[in-house]
Image: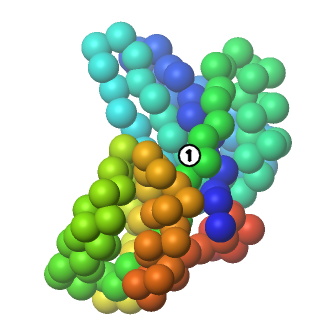
Amino acid sequence: MIVEQISIFLENRAGRLADVTRTLAEAGINIRALSLADTTDFGILRLIVTDHEKAKQALKENGFTVGRTNVVAAEVEDRPGGLHAILTMLSENGINVEYMYAFVQQSGQNAVLIFRFDRTEEAVETLQKNGVRIIPGDELYNI
């Protein structure tokens, strides 16, 4: 039920993000989801890709600093309050969301939320117990 996310540390300068996408494109890697957070000097690009091992290797060979993090992908209805319901059940169980990002495949259907939790196993158990579908990595990589 865990999804592997890669994190790339980037200097905050023009063209550096394009260097990442070029490297992945040349390696035949497709990006499924992403999040970019920045500071004045650097950024952290978080990616879910079709082949994380191949992506890590290609990025490292091109001089990027790459880490890996286990995250959880949850499906939520694309409607007002869908996210609120999930965050409420997590909060009521004392589970902290360290960060998250989301994408919608088709408006009006389901959104996919990518979560990093302080207590991952308890978060997955809580979500599943409350009827939230957790998307396995193999399925998410191939969406």
In front here: 70 or 120? 120
Which quadrant of the figure has residue 57?
A: top right
Which quadrant of the figure has residue 69?
A: top right
Q: Residue at x 33, y 51 (%)?
A: 96
**At which x and y percent is residue 86?**
31, 73
For the image, the number of numbered tags is: 1
Callout 1, which amino acid? Answer: Leu
Q: Residue at x 78, y 32 (%)?
A: 58
Disc 1 secondary structure class: strand
Location of residue 109 with respect to 141 vertically, above or below: below
**At which x and y percent is residue 3?**
64, 57
Asked whether residue 2 appears in the rendered view, the answer is yes
In front here: 1 or 55? 1
**At which x and y percent is residue 23?**
70, 33
For disc 1, the marked residue is 47
Q: Residue at x 69, y 40 (%)?
A: 24
Left or right side of 130 for 54: right
